[in-house]
Image (cartoon, grey):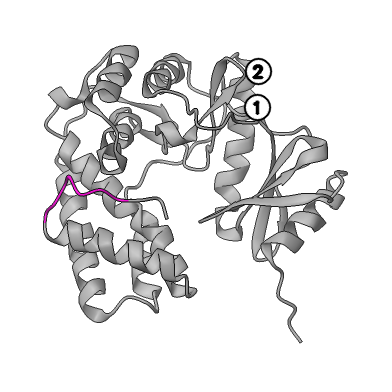
Amino acid sequence: MTMTVSPESAARMACRKSGLADRPLAQLHQHATTVFLLAEEGVIVRVSPVSKMQHLETAVSLTRWLVANDFAATEPVSVPQPVTYHPYVVTFWRHYPQPEHSTPPAGQLGALLRALHALPQPPVSLPQYQPLASLKNTVESSTYLDSDLRGWLTKRREELLDAYGRLDFPLGYGHVHGDAYPGNALWDHKDVRLGDWDEAAIAPREIDLANTFQGVRFGRTTEELDAFSHQYGYDIRQWPGLEILCAIRDLHTLGSYIRRADSGDAAAAEQLSHRIKTLRSGDDQARWSAA
């Protein structure tokens, strides 16, 4: 008989293996990764699909190097990690309690990215950025998508990859965060740290800027975009390739919603339907929610 391991049981077993207490353990968030808080230890426990193992090994090594070099990255806990309990891989991070109704401003993220991109090349092997690589398998294996949606998403992915291949990148290539947007910035008292390094890679620097501009779909204002650009020292709106990178980001965000819809998550399926409908109609100003 095969025993199914839940994210919570994987988190508890990994805590015990790493010498951490496994209680009380409170779930904070469930999306592509399930996030728990080990309050008494001041530790965030992140439970990800085991397919992310290599990315997470890289994230832990990279953030240890960044913190040692005085960059404000979220800090991995000094325990043996990642820890695997199939089909999950577990990592441990310092907890940064966040004030209610207060998120770091977009300008702070611009300053962090400027500092990140100015660092020397990390002594960590980073993968080459491959846009929409995981979406292909997600779409092809989906049990929720019908043939029409699957066909449209496949065609749209191919169109965007072709357009991406013809872009010139004035900021050049180097190490990037890969998933940089204000939601991954956290208060550390009066300072701000950048978290969630699972998608760190070697890529055009513009990748780290475009995600913030795609955030107009979630209500990001012109004033926030101006502050972000000022703090980074470059306004990507001057570059004609921004539209393509935002469209790639749009499509990339569908992956976790497709997987959640496959598992029967009705709220995710509803949001997925809304996002695809607005993409197919060409509405690049439609509001999306993070349901």
In the image, what residue occupies the spot 52% across and 42% down?
198
Q: Is residue 79 visible?
A: no
In the image, what residue occupies the spot 28% across and 34% down?
210
| Residue 27 on image: x %, y % | 67, 53
Which quadrant of the view contains residue 208?
Answer: top left
In the image, what residue occupies the spot 81% across and 57% down?
13
| Residue 145 on image: x %, y % | 32, 75
- Residues at circles 1 and 2 in contact by the CB criterion of under 8 Å: yes
| Quadrant (top left/top right/bottom left/bottom right) for the N terminus | bottom right
Tell me the element at label 1. helix
Which quadrant of the view contains residue 86?
Answer: bottom right
285 horizontally vs 85: left or right: left
Kindly identify which numbered label has been placed on residue 165. Answer: none
Looking at the rendered structure, the number of numbered marks drawn on it comes to 2
Name the dominant secondary structure of the magenta segment. Answer: loop
| Residue 119 on image: x %, y % | 47, 15
Q: Is residue 79 magenta?
A: no
In the image, what residue occupies the spot 41% across and 15% down?
111
| Residue 178 on image: x %, y % | 41, 37
Which residue is under mark 2? 68
Q: Is residue 285 magenta?
A: yes
138 horizontally vs 73: left or right: left
Kindly identify which numbered label has been placed on residue 64. Answer: 1
Q: Which residues are magenta?
A: 282-288
Camera-side residue of 168 and 268:
268
How packed mark 1 is, by other alpha carbons closer than 10 Å (few <14, some 14-19, many 20 or more), is: some
Q: Amino acid at mark 1?
A: Arg
